[in-house]
Image (cartoon, rainbow, N blue to C red):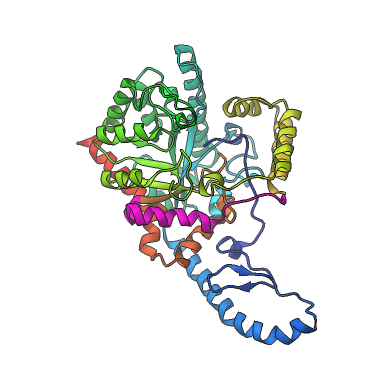
Amino acid sequence: MRNLGNDTREATAGSATRAAAAVGPHAVASPMGALAPPVSPHPGPAMRSMLPAVLALAAPLAAQDADLDARARAVHARVLTLDTHVDISTANFALERPNYGDRLPRTQVDLVKMAEGGLDAAFLIVYVGQADDLTPEGFARAHAVAMEKFAAIHRLVDSIAPGRAELARRAADVPRIVASGKRAILIGVENGFPVGADVGNVARFHALGARYMSLAHNGHSQLSDSNTGERDGVWLHQGLSPLGREVIREMNRVGMMIDISHPSKASMMQTLALTRAPIIASHSGARALCDHSRNLDDEQLRALARNGGVAQLVAFNSYVRCDARSDPARTADVEALRREFGLEGLSRGAAQQALEAMPDARRNAYLERQRQISDRRYPGDVVATVADFVDHIDHAVRVAGIDHVGIASDFDGGGGVEGWRTASETANVTRELLRRGYREADIARIWGGNLLRVLAEVERVAGS
């Protein structure tokens, strides 16, 4: 999912806080690891009479919480953590500093934040917004945008930070790169629009490092219907187009995972009937918990499991909680900011392109103002938390099984929940999984093992 700019909050705590939920100086831990209301540092007479009992209860609970934090830090350090969906702005991949190798103040992910949060690997996304122009000229424009993003990712691993990041082209590359102390970078293509009418672009994208691709985004492409058809009941292909079927066969041939997170349910089911290899949903939620067309219902989750694929559950506020909402004052502030910078009324793709075309100083001013709005707490905000997000993981595990569930943030594309707002806070997800009783081996499957198993099987099918 794409959002103009970043819904980003910088982590401001130290390394211990990055590995677990922050505990303030007067906080009392609850039995479930959450924080109870703080004990006042200046209690009145009634509170003073209760204080010994409160502190007697708090001591063992605080010890339990500290033990959980320590275990979470240890488990998080041992398992390989892989996020399957991180969006990028090419402006952050220039050779001039600051760039993606630095700690950028306005992104949710960069190499520094990955290291801070113990995020070992990430799919950086070649995203192209869907346009209505399904003509050779429209395809050419989409292809040019995709090539710019491929080039940006290659600059990161080849020139910006070759000693700290490396492009993974095979499943086996990921643990090797991580063991060397580097971040493993993989590439996903969000939207098959830039393939155009030339199926040969699938092999070209694969040669550039693309290891998954979705055939549509928000809006029907030449390859597939989008989930957005549910809004008005208007469909272009009733699932896959004939060209889309050719693209699926070609993806199987070259060894590229098929991503069904944005295409329609009909497209997904037709894909399952056609593919010779397991498929993925790179960033989707559980529809049983949040009834949104971007999420997967239980029938889809079971079908994905039968296929041997994996659903990467997404930490996207409005896909985790369907009642998530912004205070109208926040919305008004965002609209005023866009109006001031000439971005009002533009589609997300067009607004992103306009933002990237701005002079650095103006773009940075916009992003800083946007960050301030994002960081501000408005009284009417309703937000999803890490616990809400792990509810989706729990549901998918119950329906599809532990071997068919993974994790995605959709950072820098609108993703983020309270407690996991940047890559620096990644260990909070591990903490919540551990708190709920997941074993380390299962956490390792969810955090990356399942996805790498699918990628390895896709490679095997391509070689057969």
Whole-percent x and y of residue 456? 29, 44
**Residue drawn at (73%, 31%) of the image:** 362
Q: Residue furthest top?
A: 136
**Residue drawn at (71%, 33%) of the image:** 335
**Residue drawn at (73%, 37%) of the image:** 332
Q: Is residue 244 magenta?
A: no
Q: Residue furthest left?
A: 464
Q: Is residue 388 magenta?
A: yes
* Viewer-side residue, 339 vs 127: 339
Predominant secondary structure, magenta span: helix
Image label count: 0
Whole-percent x and y of residue 47? 74, 81
Q: Quadrant of the C terminus?
A: top left
* Viewer-side residue, 256 vs 224: 224
Numbered range of the magenta stretch: 377-404
* Left or right relative to 98: residue 67: left
* Viewer-side residue, 327 vs 437: 327
Residue 388 seen by the camera: yes
Q: Is residue 382 above or below residue 35?
A: above
Whole-percent x and y of residue 354? 64, 25
- Quarter residue 110 falls in: top right
